[in-house]
Amino acid sequence: GGDCVTPSQASMIGEQLGVDCPAFDLNAACAGFVYALDLAALYLNGGRYRHILIVTCEQMSRHVDWTDRATCVLFGDGAAACVVTTGDSLRYLKLTGKGNHGILHLANGNGNTPFADKKPAGTLHMNGQEVFKFAVGTVEKELTAAMNATSLKLDSVDHFLLHQANSRIIDAIISRLKAPAEKFATNIADTGNISSVSIPLLLDQMLADGRIQVGDTLVLSAFGAGMTTGTAVMTWA
């Protein structure tokens, strides 16, 4: 979440940049970056805009219970940004939403309103086993669908960039796909789970150290509270 309930974090970023273009927040939890790519593609393909700035920013440390060592040590803070423009690099993009809030959620409080029982703002609640089952099963299904839709074989994909939630989840997906582990880059040991930031941050790190080259085929897949997923296939240009 942003620094304020209102205005949006996007509006505050626009203020700092000194721009007067439309700005708004999008909340799709850990799948937010891929959701933003989909929305940007719709705007660009509609011809209304030529360049769109996507910013992902998360401060998970303020949403966890620091007395619960089973969850608080899993998450991190961070931000990433990219500019997208028209082109033919995006080959496939699909979003899903299961609508199950119970296994992963963060409740709001009621403030001091006299019309409801007093309830303080909550901390992040996660049923780790249920999230694991959802993530492994759904991401495997969506990755397979993406590769079938684009006629890709495993050896045709240069890099899989998955949401960095849990190394066990990534390992289980690799095992189910029977894919080479070296195609799945990770940074979770250094960053923790940074929600929507994890994929663009990993992408930036891989570009910086030369692991991604022009022409590489990338498959992105994220999952998060909601339960949302987003999967994309692109050729890096």
Image (tube, rainbow, N blue to C red):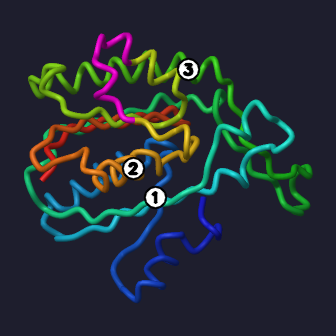
Tell me the element at label 1. strand
The N terminus lies in which quarter of the figure?
bottom right
- At a point 29% along the width and 32% down the height, the residue shown is 160
Q: Label 1 to label 2, Cα distance in Å?
A: 7 Å
Decide: is 124 above or below 172.
below
Query: Are the residues tagged 1 and 2 within 8 Å (C-beta)?
Result: yes
Tell me the element at label 2. helix
| Mark 2 or mark 3, earlier in chain | 2
Image location of residue 101, percent across then percent down: 61, 33
Decide: is 43 above or below 31.
below
- At a point 36% along the width and 35% down the height, the residue shown is 185
Image location of residue 104, percent across then percent down: 64, 33
Tell me the element at label 3. helix
The label shown at residue 65 is none
- Residue matched to label 3: 132
Residue 180, magenta (yes or no):
yes
Query: Are the residues tagged 3 and 1 within 8 Å (C-beta)?
Result: no
- Residue matched to label 2: 33
